Image (cartoon, rainbow, N blue to C red):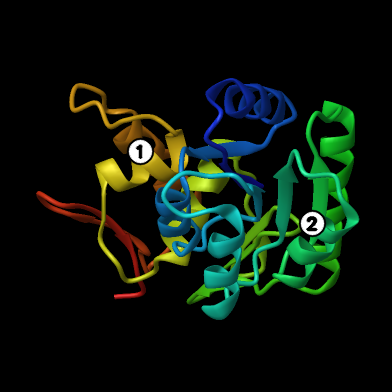
Amino acid sequence: MRILVIEDEKKVARFIKKGLEEEGYAVDLAPDGEEGLARVLDQVHDLIILDIALPKIDGLQVLKKLRERKVPTPVLLLTVRAAIEDKVLGLDSGADDYLTKPFAFQELLARIRALLRRKAETGPPLLQVEDLVLDPARHLVTRGGERIDLTSKEFALLEYLMRNAGRVLTRAMISEHVWNYDFDTETNVIDVYVNYLRRKIDSGREKKLIHTVRGSGYALKSE
């Protein structure tokens, strides 16, 4: 599961990121509302943790904009405002839950689990290209009905490719969305993981789905 944390307090953001990664989640950070909204619209995240008091665009405006654009991703609001009126305003703006700072990390985890369960129960759409099927909720991949076991990083890479099926993804784009660090032109880690996926997804099959676009990056497509 991939979580976007939109939080301008660096200490809080690092604390949340470290804790969630220790629990096995992939985590992206955005330091302001403008960058956060841009990342939200990519729709690659399973849940958004959104601070209300943000620079550039405040959290409630980010929330309203993403709901206006029909982004269904669950949103957990973080705020120092504890008044009932503030909670009602946040929930009425489209939030799915509300947590007041300071908070216990275990409570944050419990609320995240509850939101992700609720999302799974509503039946998130399966991703499918040809006979390759990825179930985000069950963390399950099959091809031709045969289960394919992937590591968490392979799964994240395949999910990103499938959510952008037919689109050429550069190594820098893949690095940002899957590895959470700035692209290093000296590393071949992305090429290595694409090859891992190829062996599991395409090896021994007549129709290849993962394609190299020379000089650009990679694309998952049926052609």
5 sits left or right of 88 in the view: left
Mark 1 packing: few (<14 Cα in 10 Å), some, or many (20+)?
some
Q: Nearer the viewer, residue 5 or 124?
A: 5
x%, y% of residue 77? 72, 51
Q: Quick one: which residue is furthest to the left in this view?
A: 215
Report the residue at 76% width, 65% height from top. 89
Q: Is residue 18 above or below residue 41?
A: above
Q: Which residue is mark 1?
A: 175
Q: Nearer the viewer, residue 146 or 45?
A: 45
x%, y% of residue 170? 24, 49
Report the residue at 46% width, 44% height from top. 55
At mark 2, the secondary structure is: helix
At mark 1, the secondary structure is: helix
Q: Is residue 70 above or below residue 104?
A: below
x%, y% of residue 205? 43, 62
Amino acid tagged 2: Asp
Res 202 seen here: no
Res 71 seen here: yes
* Disc assigned to residue 86: 2
Residue 172 location, quadrant: top left
Q: Is residue 138 above or below residue 198?
A: below
Distance, label 2 to label 1, CA atoms, is 37 Å
Report the residue at 66% width, 74% height from top. 125
Q: Nearer the viewer, residue 108 or 215?
A: 108
- Which circle's residue, 2 or 1, is located before the other in the chain? 2
Residue contact at pointers 2 and 1, CB within 8 angstroms: no
